[in-house]
Image: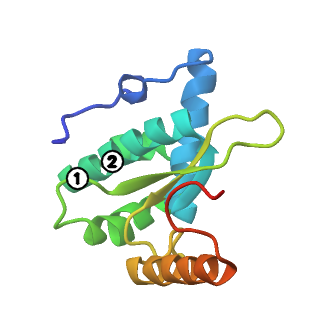
């Protein structure tokens, strides 16, 4: 997605549940938290919108639009992190700077939840690697065969 000059945060959002001021404040705080921690947990609709906003923010940073990024991030000490840490990480990518994961629903109100993170961060991975998944599946199959549970079909 090529970045066009877009100062309006509202144009990037598909999920608009609140008043305009509250919504802008909410997404500015979410973008600030994503830049600060590089991983944020929130509802799945907000995750998708936050991912879209963060992708556009990196595209605008590549173009050098510091004014818009300055207006989207509430903690001004994080502006150098965008240009000094995130921008060099993604300078060879065209898009796909964030990843959205679905997680189990929240227990209090059963809201669908998700996690947004910047790709290439130094945090521990949320999902195991392919080799680890393969080992886990093999262990599960071995346990099932030891217990006499058929691998396919309906147990009688």
Q: Residue at x 31, y 52 (%)?
A: 58
* Secondary structure of residue under mark 2: helix
In the image, residue 106 lies at what x, y percent?
A: 74, 43
Q: Is residue 31 left or right of residue 59?
A: right
Q: Residue at x 51, y 42 (%)?
A: 47
In the image, residue 153 lies at what x, y percent?
A: 51, 56
Quadrant where the C terminus lies?
A: bottom right
Q: Residue at x 58, y 77 (%)?
A: 140
Return the residue at label 2.
55
Viewer can see residue 144: yes
Rendered view: 24 above or below 145: above
Rendered view: 32 above or below 52: below
Q: CA distance from mark 1 to mark 2?
A: 7 Å
Return the residue at label 1.
95
Q: Are marks 1 and 2 in contact (CB under 8 Å)?
A: yes
Q: Earlier in the sequence, mark 1 or mark 2?
A: 2
| Residue placed furthest toward the front | 156
* Secondary structure of residue under mark 1: loop
Q: Is residue 148 left or right of residue 92?
A: right
Quarter of the image where one finds residue 68: top left
In the image, residue 64 lies at what x, y percent?
A: 23, 52
């Amino acid at each position: 997605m090529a970045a066009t000059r877009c100062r309006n945060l509202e144009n990037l959002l598909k999920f608009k549940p609140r008043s305009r001021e509250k919504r802008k404040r909410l997404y500015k705080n979410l973008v600030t938290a994503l830049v600060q921690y590089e991983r944020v947990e929130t509802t799945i609709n907000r995750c998708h919108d936050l991912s879209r906003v963060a992708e556009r923010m990196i595209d605008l940073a590549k173009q050098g639009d510091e004014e818009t990024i300055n207006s989207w991030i509430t903690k001004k000490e994080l502006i150098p992190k965008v240009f000094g840490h995130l921008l060099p990480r993604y300078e060879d990518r065209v898009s796909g700077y964030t990843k959205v994961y679905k997680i189990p629903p929240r227990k209090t109100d059963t809201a669908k939840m998700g996690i947004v993170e910047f790709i290439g961060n130094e945090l521990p991975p949320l999902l195991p690697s392919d080799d680890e998944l393969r080992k886990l599946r093999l262990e599960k199959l071995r346990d099932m065969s030891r217990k006499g549970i058929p691998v396919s079909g309906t147990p009688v």
